[in-house]
Image: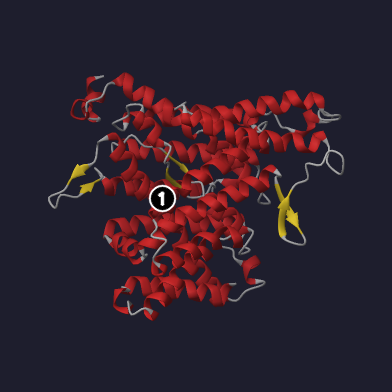
Amino acid sequence: MDKIKNFFKFEERGTTIRAEIIAGCTTFMAMAYILVVNAGMLSAIDGVSYGAIYIATAISAVAGTILIGLLANLPLAQASGMGLNAFFTYTVVFGLGFTYANALVFVLFDGILFVVLTATGLRKIIFEGIPDCVKKAIPVGIGLFIAFIGFQDSGLVVDNGGTLVGLQSFNLIGDASWGSIMPLCLTIIAVFVIAVLTKKNVKGAILWTMLGTTLAYYLLGFTVSGFYDGFSERFDYSFVQPFKDFGTQSIGQVFAQGFNFDSYLEKHNAAQLIVAFATTALAFCMVDMFDTLGTLYGACKAGGITIVKEDGKEDIPNANKAMISDAVATCVGAVCGTSTVTTFVESSAGVAAGGRTGFSSVITAALFFVAMFFSPLAQLIPSCAYAPALIYVGYAMMSNVVDINWKDPVVAIPAFFAIVIMPFTYNISYGIAFGLIAYVIISICTGAFKKINISTWVITILFVAMLFLTH
């Protein structure tokens, strides 16, 4: 026990074994929903099952969380990131036309690029190449995008030929039935419940609400005619099958089929593939980078474990090691068959509960390992139970909107474009592209040409090429 305390520097950071265990459990409870949400999202892609993605998500979460705990000694946890999984599924696969295995290549390249950029110091150059207004807008736009997906998955928002989107009917007198609106009502109520529990500082508010909504869904199922007809055939209760699917459908697919771009090249040429590859990988890397940096700083600041540099500025302890952990975990995720792994903002819940060292991360990783064997039960969670998590996370990601100076068009218009283009086009990279383009054009026209640095020019040109050559 003393070796553990010394390795994780318990005395230096003023913590105890008990506090770290509680913190690790708290972090797990706060982010365990990702196992269900990520599996539900990625399994919408042809050729990969819910069970396979569930196992891939769990394994990558274990690997990433163990890495950041042991290597960087930080009380943080990692898993497939919200927003990045939406980008993977709806932009890269459904939008651009790449296969599931192709998309994993982008994730793998993202991880490798992240390692190189962190090791060489180029990460800072690229990070500084994105205007501050666009940086602040990216999580806001992703938040709206994720919330939009949640509304669609729940069935609240539906396709409408006249206005593109519309609200699902609640008209019991007309074309709606209790069976059709019951899940919609549960979705709305669940979002409110998450808000109330969060306000009351209930740890794991999203997970508890998800479980409660699932229970309510099946209880109310008795009030719906034919709800349980064929129920046993709709679910696979085998605890072994998810691992079999993982072995045949996801792990190693990045190497087995990922570099075969024949399906994409049927409708595009080699030049379009090169531009799409460069911009998509860059978008993955940038979103991952911003997400990780923001979470690292926010969680460490909240826990009082930031360090003060000689110039008086605060910094994250073992920042480069934390970044390397994130990058390596992303590579592991790609090999396992899931989207980009990143540091979760829900780690702040564990920090608030007293987590100060990487030992709490080890506890969180252990719980993810145990959860890996409960995929059959997780499949019982309906969309009306996990969609509220998407909606609420979307709301939470919009907090940066208050940091944007909306009175200055030079920064407000690029931010506005970045925010609205993402959900309106179902594409995160398009939002980043329009934000950068707007910033460059407005800066030139207002005499701020010299403020645009070289890296901003390079990144913007890449995204312009993406728009004109791949879309």
Quarter-of-image position of residue 296? top left
> What scheme was used to colour the molecule?
secondary structure
The relative height of residue 105 versus residue 53 in the rendered view (above or below) is: below
Q: x, y percentage for residue 400?
A: 42, 51
Any part of residue 158 in sight? yes
Name the outermost residue toward the front: 407
Residue with the mark numbered 1:
291
Q: x, y percentage for residue 263?
A: 65, 66
Callout count? 1
Camera-side residue of 256 and 152: 152
Q: Label 1: how many residues lie within 10 Å, few (<14), some (14-19) or many (20+)?
A: many
Q: x, y percentage for residue 162?
A: 77, 62
Q: Is residue 169 left or right of residue 208?
A: right
Figure quadrant of the N terminus = top left
Q: Is residue 212 left or right of residue 72?
A: right
Camera-side residue of 1 and 437: 437
Residue at figure coordinates x 47%, y 26% from the top left: 202
Camera-side residue of 42 and 147: 147
- Secondary element under disc 1, as helix, strand or loop, is helix
Camera-side residue of 179 and 123: 179
Residue at figure coordinates x 81%, y 30% from the top left: 227
**Kind of residue sitting beneath label 1:** Asp
Q: x, y percentage for residue 345?
A: 41, 41
Any part of residue 253 in sight? no
Residue at figure coordinates x 22%, y 20% from the top left: 2
Figure quadrant of the C terminus = bottom right
